Each structure stands twice: as C-alpha cells, then as structure tokens.
Image: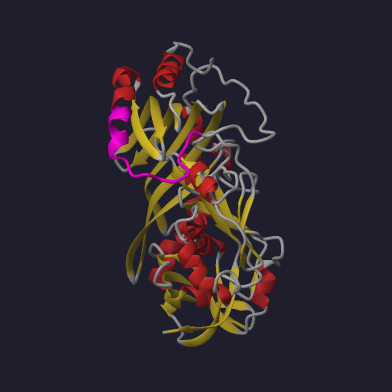
Amino acid sequence: MTGFYDDGLFGKLFTEAQREEHGPGHSVELYERAGASLELLEDEEGVCVSEVKERGFALRLFRGGRVGFAAAGPEGLALLLPRARSLLPRARVRRGARAATPLAGEPPAEPVTGAPNVPDEAAAREILVDFRRAVTRAGGGAVAVREASVVMGERRERIATSGGREASWTSRAASLIAHLAGRAKEGRFSARVVANAARAEELPIARLARLGVDRVLLPLTGHAAPTGRVDVLLDSHVAAHLIGRLAPFFFGDAEDALLASRTRGGKDGLTSPVLSLVDDIAAPGGPIRIPRDGEGTPKRRTVVVERGMVTGRLTDVASAVRRETTSSGNAIRRLWSEPPAVGVTNFFVDPSPGVSPLDLLASVTKGVYAAVLLERPDIDLAADRFRLVTAGYTIEKGRAAHRVSETVLSGRLSELLRGIASIGDDLKFVAGAGGGVGSPTLYIPRWKLG
C-alpha cells in the first residue's frame, strides 16, 4: 500500500483496523490527507507570507449502520482506533452506512507519490499586483484595495476500505480575497469579494475587480429603485449565489418530503422549464477539479433538475444505498478532521439553451438589472421564501439607464424559480455550498418590487 508518504503509518493502521473489525456488518475506511499551502496577505501595514503544511488521518468504523469516527495527526495514531471504537455504541443507526466498495468499471487509481509542494510565492505576488491594477482601471481611482490575500495550495489524498476500494489523488486550488473601499460625495462604502479557482492562473482577476468596484460605487452613486412590476435581470454572479442556496434540496434523501410537497410528488416542476441543474466535475469554468470525493468515489455528471423537473440527487455511499442506486461522488470532506457529508462539486444552471445577455437586455422595455449582491442571500427552503439585496441599473428600452443603489427582491422562492422566462449563455461560478456554484444571467419578467 504505497502513497505520498511511505513511512508505513497508513498501511499499519489500516491492517490493524481490519484485523479487529471483521464481524458481520462490520467495515473499515481509512482516509489520509497531506497538504501544503501558501498565503500572501497584503494590507496597509505591509506584506505577510505564511506557509502551512498538514497531514492528518481519519478513520471510520461501521457496525450495523452505526459509525464511529476519529481523526488525528501522525503523532496521535495510537489512539485513533480505540477512540473510533468507543464511539460506536452511542452512535445513531443510519441505514446504508458502510465503507465504500469499487463501482462496476471503476478505473484503478494511479498511485500518488511524494509530499505536496509549497506553491510559488512569486506567482502570488504577481496576482496581487494584477488585481490592484485591475481595480484602479475599473474604478477610475475612486476605489482602493485595503487588504488582499492570495492562498494557493496543493493536497494529496488517499483512501482504503475493507470493501476493496484503494485510491489516491492530487488536487490544487487558489483563492483571492480582497477588501475594497471607496468614497464619493454621498459618503463611503466598502465591500469584500472572493474568487476561487482550480489553478492560480485561472483566477478571474478582472471580473473580481469589476465586481468589487460595482459593490462599492453603486450604493454610493445610485438612485432609488423603481416600484411596481418590472422585468428583472439577475447578473450571473447574483444568480449563482441564489442557485447555490438550492443545492441542499438535492443532498441525498434529506429533503425528499419537502421536494415532494413542493412538486406534488414529482408531478409539477420545481423550476421553470428553461432551467436544468447539474453537478459536474467537468463543468467549463468550474473551480473544483478534484477527481474523487471524500469516500474515494470517482466524480461524475449528475443532473438533478431537467427542464424544470426533479430527476436526481447528489449522494454519498449511505444515501445511495437508501435510494438503491450508486453514489454520485458527492461526499465532501471540508477538513480532514471532519467526517464526509454530502455537498456539491460544480453545481450550476446548464447554459446550453441560453442566449446572449445582450439579447436578454434588448428584450426588456422597463426593468432592473441586479448587477451585484450587497448582502448574503436570505433563502429559506422550508418556508419557501427568499430575499436578495442588490444594486445595479434600471433598464429602459433595452439599454442600461440609471444606477440603482439598492433593489430588494423578495417573495416566494417557488414563484421566482418558476417565473424564470429565459437564461443567458454566460455561465459564471462563485464559491458556495462547499464547492463551486454557477449560473448564467436569469430573466424574470413582471416581478413586483417595493
């Protein structure tokens, strides 16, 4: 059992756990993650560079639907098996809980060797320089970067189960986080913006700068929003955050009853027929490219809504067993020290039936373009309510007219989703729901404001 660290710790612990957990309904899963990351933080006090290396092990013991989970670094491995075993009697029985087995036709994983590499500091510095320049260009000197950080990392993971799965894989990630501030005669305003990507060179620097400038300046220089019924265009960034809040609908079987009530047992559409919702590791522009999930299952494309109708779920091994299907590869480990939970990879609105955003704009006689979010979306799936606080522009005869400092969109979530009349082809992703969430521009006619 070779891997990125060949000091024998992984193989020794797995062998010991297998030897002691071998009764009927017993199974074992051992997971290891090693990571190396670099953070470059630049603020008004100067520049700070930090490097972090980590290595951790997580063990799950399964007995008759009960799960005992324990995690530790290399120095704490002696206690890992006794700790997991001690938790089993008190654990709640979860039907379907068991260690993963290889899927039919699952390709063998190539062994990953060598410790993860610390990213290049020079590349991080270049990203921050480019971002500051982009903000200056987009804001015309009216917006300043108060603080910005770039985090780049590489991690290597491996897993072995008593069901026969043995796999290892490597992934990388980068993020850019910035705090911007601006001043106008109306006052001051600040905003925080975030971008994630699978590679540092894929960070959308210019788009993030434009977004940050709009979030700062629109509230300062915009007019009051119109009232009454108007057509609404949700920018892809705003729409992506909304779509991300829908993902828990499809996490295993947790919301089956709610989905059934919302769709009359599947007879009605959850959304407008123009919407299809997909989770896909191969999504164009998707920030997540990890080939396997936290249980070692190969990630794949899963359609959960097709032309408005609910067609699937995002599952881990346990929820897939309960649904009598195979795992979709959506068991996510946010930290190596936490057990996996169902989450998204790249979850998005399929843009294939979409049209150019300019064509959407041209179709609006009187409306509002919601360009940026000013607050986190407030979405209550159970209560069927939503609230989006945005800033943007009024639209008159197919053209952007006046700046709008704040527009509040609120009401029944189901009415909004079923009211989407058309979509753009400009798919964009943001961070959300534990992965990447994306959407093109969405067009909702005759929505009531005020």
Q: Quadrant of the C terminus?
A: bottom left
Above or below, comparing residue 303 to residue 289 in the picture: below
Give the image location of residue 271, x and y in percent.
58, 70
Give the left or right position of residue 300, taking residue 412 as reference.
right
Relative placement, left or right, of 74 versus 333 is left
Q: Which residues are magenta?
A: 83-99
Q: Nearer the viewer, residue 177 or 94?
A: 94
Q: Residue furthest top?
A: 7
Residue at image coords 45%, 11%: 8
- In the figure, residue 150 lies in which quadrant? top left
Q: Position of residue 200 (x, y in %)?
A: 54, 37
Give coordinates of residue 263: x percent, y percent.
55, 72
User: 248 or 95, which lies in front?
Assistant: 95
Residue 179 can be seen in this image:
yes
Q: Is residue 338 visible?
A: no
Residue at 37% in and 44% down: 93
* Residue 439 sits in quarter: bottom right
Colouring style: secondary structure
